Amino acid sequence: LQGLALNGNSIFNLPSEFSNLRNLLLLDLSRNPLGRIPSEILSLSKLKFLRLSEIGLSIDLESLKALTELRRLELDNNGISLLPSDIFSLTNLTKLSVHSNSISCLPPEIAQLRRLQHLSLNINELRALPPEIGALINLLTLFLNKNRLESLPAEIGKLTLLKVLILRRNRLT
């Protein structure tokens, strides 16, 4: 089994046998009342796409650092207020989506995600972007709708591959 979509169910826990799905590449557990990152997925070392949106995430995201092969990570609608620095050790990420959370700042470690092509930060509490955003030289799309941005750092000009930049409903002057 390489892909498994269990989204939109009433799953509270995963059985321990779930960790035997060693060839799993895609896993969607979104819209389940998990409330945490299931430890059973942390041994899925081949996982490339993980969607944990709307699971009522209330614990640290630091355990995700074990999933070093991840390319796409979606953590939308979870009430996340801070991205822990360990998430930036996922240097193979090409897409990170954390829209509809409560993130108020991006740490400088964002610069470690040099392979990132798509970054969605819509509907958060961002007041500023760190200058390190300029290190994301492979970024193609950057979504920043409905934040509290008043300005952009000059380093945004270093994103020469950027095709789409959405800044609607901010506080830009």
Image (cartoon, grey):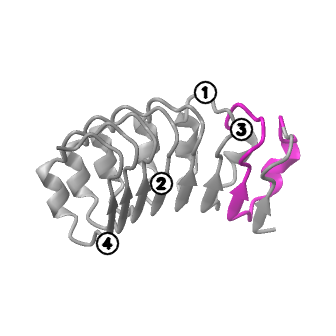
Where residue 59 is drawn, which disc sits there?
Answer: 1
Whole-angstrom CA distance, mark 1 to mark 3, is 12 Å
Distance from the alpha carbon under mark 3 to that under mark 4: 37 Å
Task: Identify residue for label 4.
Answer: 163
Dot 2 or dot 4: first in sequence order is 2
Check the image and report above or below for 11 versus 74: above
Q: Is residue 77 above or below residue 45?
A: above
Q: Amino acid at mark 4?
A: Lys
Vertical placement of residue 137 versus 133, above or below: below
The answer to whether marks 3 and 4 mark residues whose Cβ atoms lie closer than 8 Å is no
Tag 1's secondary structure? loop
In the image, residue 40 lies at what x, y percent? 75, 42
* The N terminus lies in quadrant: bottom right
Q: Quadrant of the C terminus?
A: top left
- In-front residue for pair 16/6: 6
Mark 3, secondary structure of its residue: helix
Tell me the mark number nearer the camera, choosing from 4 and 1.
4
Query: Rounded to the nearest whole Å, what is the CA distance between mark 2 and mark 4?
Result: 16 Å
* Circle 4 SS class: loop
Whether 94 is among the magenta residues is no
Q: Is 62 left or right of 118, judged from the image as shown?
A: right
Inspect the image, locate mark 2, and give the three-letter code of the amino acid beneath it. Leu
Q: Residues within 10 Å of mark 2 (few under 14, many from 20)?
A: some
Residue under label 3:
39
Look at the image and tell me whether residue 22 can be seen.
yes
Q: Amino acid at mark 1?
A: Ile
Q: Which tag is nearer the camera, tag 2 or tag 4?
A: 4
Residue 96 - label? 2
